[in-house]
Image (cartoon, rainbow, N blue to C red):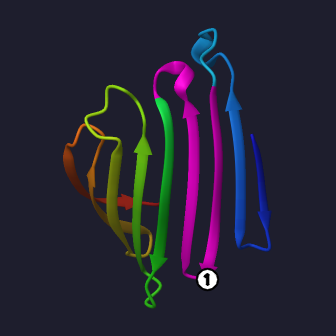
Amino acid sequence: SVDYTWNSRLELSAAAAFNGAGIDGNDIFFLGARYAVVDNARVGLNYVDADDSGEGKTIALYGDYTLADGRTNLEAYIANNDRDSNETDNAFGIGVNYDLGGARLGASLQRDYAENVTADMGVRFEF
């Protein structure tokens, strides 16, 4: 993999795995970019080609925004995957995290490629 950051605003990444899990021809490629539009808002675009393994090609657009309080972060994504067995080619989600100072309260709502809608909520502690 190769990663590059320019001026703390633009992040670029590329990676490849060949014969993943020891399976001949199981090759996966990744390209990604994230840009800080302003100090508290970023957008990104990822591309994954896992077609050789039957997982298809995926492109995802995502972003996050930290509110003025500096503790609340909103996140969202939309992704498209062309795998033949998907019910739908589009998945999307939205989430929120609140910094409690040493812990974080988070929640999200998302729909996957099987058109299942899931929600989660929890607390993450950092030591």
Q: Residue 95: percent from the left, percent from the top?
A: 33, 64
**In the rendered structure, which amino acid carries the disc numbered 1?**
Asp
Crowding at dot 1, Cα within 10 Å, few <14 / some 14-19 / many 20+, comes out as few
Magenta region: 28-55
Q: Is residue 47 magenta?
A: yes
Residue at which label 1 appears: 39
Q: Is residue 127 visible?
A: no
Residue at 42 percent of width and 35 percent of height: 82
Residue at 57 percent of width and 57 percent of height: 45
Query: Toward which corner of the image does residue 86 lie, by quadrant?
Result: top left
Image quarter of the N terminus:
top right
Given residues 124 and 71, the one toward you in this image is 71
Q: Residue 42: percent from the left, percent from the top?
A: 56, 72
In the figure, is residue 1 to the left or right of 70? right
Q: Residue 13: percent from the left, percent from the top?
A: 71, 50
Principal secondary structure, stretch drawn in magenta:
strand
Give the farthest residue toward the bottom. Answer: 68
Q: Is residue 27 above or below residue 22?
A: below
